[in-house]
Image (tube, rainbow, N blue to C red):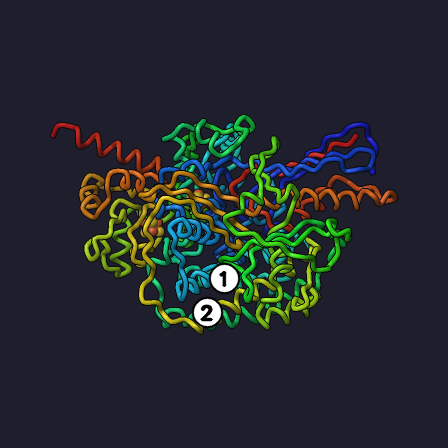
Amino acid sequence: MTHRSSRVLRVGALSRVEGEGALHLRLHDGRVTRTELQIYEPPRFFEAFLRGRAYTEPPDITSRVCGICPVAYQLSACRAVEDACGVEVGGQLAALRRLLYCGEWIESQILHIHLLHAPDFLGYASAVDMARTRRADVERGLRIKQAGNAILELLGGRAIHPVNVRIGGFHRVPTRAELRPLREQLARARDDAWATVRWVAGFDFPDAGADHALLALIEPGRYAIEGGIPAVMAAPHAHGLPGDTDEPLPLRQFPVHAFTEEVTERQVPYSTALQATLDGERYLTGSLARYALSGRWLSPVALQAAREAGLGDPLSGAVCRNPFRSIVVRAVEALYAIDEALRIIDAYRPPPRPYVEVFPRADTGHGATEAPRGLLYHRYALDADGTVTDALLIPPTAQNQGAIEEDLRRLVQRRLDHEDDPVTDTELTALCERGIRNHDPCISCSAHFLDLTVDRS
Amino acid sequence: MPATARATRPTLAVFKLASCDGCQLTLLDCEDELLELAGRIEIRHFLEASSAVGSGPYDLALVEGSVTTPEDERRVHEIRAAARHLVTIGACATAGGIQALRNFADVEEYRATVYARPEYIATLATSTPVSAHVPVDFELRGCPIDRGQLLEVITAFLVGRKPDIPDHSVCFACKRRGTVCVTVAHGTPCLGPVTHAGCGAICPAYGRGCYGCFGPSATTNLPALIPLLRRDGMDEPTLRRALRTYNATAFAALEARSQEQEERPS
Ligand code: SF4
Ligand code: SF4
């Protein structure tokens, strides 16, 4: 590396993520001494203005936190409010919720894979550039994404901020005949998604290991999406293992209502997004965590795809700790979501009513679901007439921030350790951007630039 | 394509202020049209989609999000200076968005509710639309915007004509869609009569009343609707909340106007 006494660099803007942020690197004597992922999120104050709203409103309102995963917000909100009111939604209504969520998983994971992340591996600035030489790959992505959007549009009314979700269920449920046209589109998307798994499995993956605890919901028997119990797989270092180990490690579970006893959010001076820790330590939520904790419950098609893609055998507890390979896990999850959507459609019998009646009561409710980027937790306190008196939202990106910073520190350090091959700032920026995109962070409540600041002393 | 032909393609830029990304995502959701569009225009700045960032001037700049920080207040001027045409996309950029609820509250209290160390947070006391800061050539409504309308606006600006975006209310779209009126048939409170069309009247088709995500339409008669909403079970606080959510400032301005009309001696 270049030895200059002190140096500050501002390079580029973080692109191909939802929202914009900044990264501050401090290098000293060839060591990375500080990595700060700065999220210059103009605060939008959702938790503040949810106070005083009716208990029926959080699903529609909180969907506006994120245009990329509105269903995750809607369904976490529904679960939390229903929990406060002592209602559990089951049967075909629950199946329809899962179907809607599958639509979002397909749309969002494929958006990330084909339009935002794949260009990193193949050396393009964007999917549009990539389309000049690899049009078929881009078109295939758009087709799969369209199938996900078709579910959202049919069941939710529209793909972004669907209107059909309400506390207790839906405003209107589809007939069997209405769902049928989705079948053909999804069946084709399933073939396309297989092709995508194979495509991304062939990319070049730098060596990297994520030495974090992994947090995801689990629902023994099936891959957790719209609910489950929080479970944690310990960090390898806690067992004296290296960060890139693919050993499954013991799990520990805790109830959703204990979430804020386990996960602590703190504010750091350089970012408007809060940072969460679990038992005082950084941790990772999202595709890698879900795959490690729930992989064995993938459908046969998705299990097969995971094995073929080199992710090991989920049935014997395979774990993938290389963040660069998250693109492969996402592809497997997209394939699973398509398969699951087809299963739900085939088994669908319209419920007698589109929703169950939910009457308010004075209590606090907790809800967590698996957004494509990871666990999303909501908590609401209601008074007796259903007015929200307090609200708390803990999005995946806030939880992943500490883990992302640590991954970047390792990546940069590994690169700096190549003494004979000095690293340029352009190269560092590209590396950090890739490191960040591996986690598909949704800083969408944020704006502004990723200025990479490198302090060298 | 030869470089000269490419150089003559009109240039597009997409910018984001305080928002959820949903309106710019609408562009990436145009799966059938995206690649064709990208062949006809040069997407020169679109951080969500591309890491190649080109400087202005841009033929068309789409701006998502509202102005909520001193930095963004400065940035809208820069964007305006770099854009031949500036179009705002969505309720945030056009009416301040849901984050404009702070305009009716004490932002200091908001800040302290959400942050343990409020002093680290730089924010303005208001969330304002882009047009409050710089001249805007066209405002596209919706939270989120409609895909078809977005394509219409981009195409129109690129060929230099006025976009064909009707100003009427959701009611018209319901009639066109053949949806039975939820208010008449079920007594469901619905903001459709005062809400700008554009979504295709989705909510009534799904059995719920419109909640106004496209903001007020051009010719609205709010005073006539209010008694109907009351009849259908909306009490005063519920009505207020319904009008003050996704397009809070636009509906509040409408409320103030209708108040004036009511008070004016006839
Ligand atoms: S108008 Fe609605 S959809 Fe568009 S950016 Fe704002 S919150 Fe998101
Ligand atoms: S009917 Fe009203 S609330 Fe529903 S999508 Fe259309 S404009 Fe938005």
Q: Which chain letter matches label 2?
A: A
Q: Which chain letter matches label 1?
A: A
Tell me, yes or no, whether dots 2 and 1 are on the same chain. yes
Binning the other alpha carbons within 10 Å of mark 2 as few (below 14), some (14 to 19) or many (20 upward) gives some
Q: Is residue A223 left or right of residue B87?
A: right
Give the quarter of the image for residue A10.
top right
Where is residue A171 drawn, in percent x and y?
Answer: 33, 58
Amino acid under label 1?
Cys
Where is residue A393 drawn, in percent x and y?
Answer: 49, 43
Q: Which SS class for mark 2?
A: helix
Residue A102's label in the rendered image is 1
Where is residue B177 drawn, in percent x and y?
Answer: 28, 60
| C-alpha span from label 2 to label 1 | 10 Å
Q: Which part of the image, by quadrant, shows the N terminus of chain B?
A: bottom right
Residue drawn at x 36%, y 72% is: A177
Binning the other alpha carbons within 10 Å of mark 1 as few (below 14), some (14 to 19) or many (20 upward) gives many
Residue A239's label in the rendered image is none
Dot 2 and dot 1 residues touching (CB under 8 Å): yes
Q: Exactly how many numbered labels are in the figure? A: 2
Residue drawn at x 59%, y 47% is: A441
In the image shown, does A75 or A237 lie closer to the viewer?
A237
Residue A193, above or below B223? below
Q: Is residue A10 left or right of residue A154?
A: right
Amino acid under label 2?
Ile
The residue beneath circle 2 is: A344
Q: Which SS class for mark 1?
A: helix
Residue drawn at x 26%, y 49% is: B190
Where is residue B174 drawn, in percent x and y?
Answer: 27, 56
Residue drawn at x 35%, y 63% is: A173
In the image shown, does B93 or A159 lie closer to the viewer?
A159
Task: Say if disc 2 is inside 8 Å of ligand 2.
Answer: no
Q: Earlier in the sequence, mark 2 or mark 1?
A: 1
